[in-house]
Image (tube, helix red, strand yellow):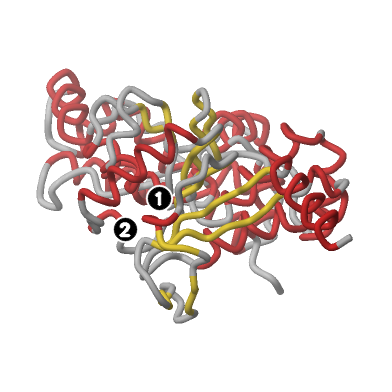
């Protein structure tokens, strides 16, 4: 009888989907526990033969501290992880873009991803894949704060900085931290249908599919010019006069330049056109008002230089993937 039960368990194990996550000292714990909880909760709604088996693979042996002070013990060291996984994910961490785990690990990761049915990364775990040469010519995403550095590291890789997750063949990458949950729910829906994914999302009290992309979470304006340059003068003028027309002539005058020369110099130095900068500035100002005040949308639109509330809604949808009202519901300060 005992032999029968062992054979049944072994048969079920062979049929189950194994989800493995690679961790290291300094890993962001939510990059690991978020996806694992999605697949663990899924087992509540699946028949035993369809259950996910979860495994944590360590780059190092023994207890590994997370970036928040927790410690993780992997089920096995990467050198002992030789099976073909259904899904192999690598987690991220604050220092991961600057970490190198050595040739032996990179070789294992290349081989393990080649054997896996699907592989990918959570947050800036994409850097681990990149250093193993697994992102060449692919389309990916990562945390918005690391997107530029990843693009520089992998010139042949198309980095979609505003996506919550990206599917490129059997490669799946997610954006910052909690986006690993979004990706995992998407994969779960692919495996077992949207009803199971919705049931898991309800258990975890999260959305099955969040509105918009990463840009609604990131600081929109970043420094584009030397503080003493003519372009910086024009940028300061924009921020101080959002309700004005802000034509090329206005900005050129603020920079003490001809309109033609100003447009060329601004685009070269700021890497965006003057019109693009003006629209970004208006969106950023509107985000602040939506987060911190209860002003009507038409008032916010006027104070930030949009033609009207509908114009602001159109720009928000195009840039952030959400309406101003949705943005306020997501980010308004609790009072």
> Residue placed at 63% from the left, 47% from the top?
18
Residue 178, percent across and down? 58, 55
245 or 280: nearer the viewer: 280
Q: Quadrant of residue 22?
A: bottom left
- Secondary structure state at the residue bearing disc 1: helix
> Residue placed at 37% from the left, 37% from the top?
111
Q: Is residue 60 above or below residue 53?
A: below
158 or 115: nearer the viewer: 115
Q: Quadrant of the N terminus?
A: bottom right
Left or right: 312, with 261 as reference point: right
Q: Residue furthest bottom?
A: 69
Residue 165, percent across and down? 55, 38
87 or 316: nearer the viewer: 87
> Residue placed at 42% from the left, 32% from the top?
114
Q: CA distance from mark 2 to mark 1?
A: 7 Å
Residue 38, percent across and down? 70, 54
Question: Residue 181 got which mark?
Answer: none
Q: Quadrant of residue 281?
A: top left
> Residue placed at 67% from the left, 40% from the top?
211
Whether label 2 touches label 1, CB < 8 Å? yes
Q: Quadrant of the C terminus?
A: bottom right
Query: Which residue is label 2 attached to?
Result: 96
Specify few, some or many for label 2: CA neighbours under 10 Å numbering under 14, 14-19, or 20 or more. many
Q: Residue furthest top?
A: 260
Left or right: 154, with 278 as reference point: left
- Secondary structure state at the residue bearing disc 2: helix
Residue 9, percent across and down? 78, 53
Query: Which residue is label 1 attached to?
Result: 125
């Amino acid at each position: 009888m005992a032999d029968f039960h062992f054979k049944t368990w072994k048969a079920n194990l062979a049929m189950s989907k194994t989800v493995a996550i690679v961790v290291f000292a300094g890993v962001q714990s939510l990059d690991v526990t978020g996806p694992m909880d999605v697949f663990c909760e899924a087992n509540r709604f699946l028949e035993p033969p369809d259950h996910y088996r979860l495994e944590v693979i360590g780059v190092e042996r023994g207890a590994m501290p997370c970036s928040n002070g927790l410690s993780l013990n992997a089920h096995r060291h990467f050198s002992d992880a030789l099976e073909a996984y259904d899904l192999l994910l690598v987690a991220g961490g604050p220092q991961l873009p600057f970490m190198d785990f050595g040739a032996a690990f990179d070789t294992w990761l290349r081989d393990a991803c080649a054997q896996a049915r699907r592989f990918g990364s959570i947050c800036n775990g994409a850097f681990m894949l990149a250093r193993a040469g697994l992102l060449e010519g692919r389309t990916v995403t990562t945390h918005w704060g690391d997107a530029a550095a990843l693009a520089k590291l992998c010139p042949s890789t198309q980095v979609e900085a505003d996506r919550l997750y990206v599917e490129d063949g059997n490669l799946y990458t997610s954006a910052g931290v909690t986006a690993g949950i979004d990706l995992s729910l998407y994969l779960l829906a692919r495996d077992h249908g949207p009803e199971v994914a919705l049931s898991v999302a309800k258990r975890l009290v999260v959305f099955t599919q969040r509105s918009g992309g990463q840009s609604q979470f990131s600081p929109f304006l970043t420094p584009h010019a030397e503080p003493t340059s003519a372009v910086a003068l024009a940028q300061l003028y924009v921020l101080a006069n959002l309700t004005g027309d802000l034509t090329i002539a206005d900005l050129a005058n603020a920079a003490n330049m001809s309109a033609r020369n100003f447009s060329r110099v601004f685009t070269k130095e700021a890497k965006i056109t003057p019109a693009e900068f003006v629209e970004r500035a208006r969106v950023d100002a509107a985000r602040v008002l939506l987060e911190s005040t209860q002003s009507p949308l038409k008032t916010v639109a006027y104070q930030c230089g949009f033609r009207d509330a509908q114009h602001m809604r159109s720009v928000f949808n195009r840039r952030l993937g959400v309406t101003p009202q949705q943005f306020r519901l997501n980010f308004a300060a609790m009072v």
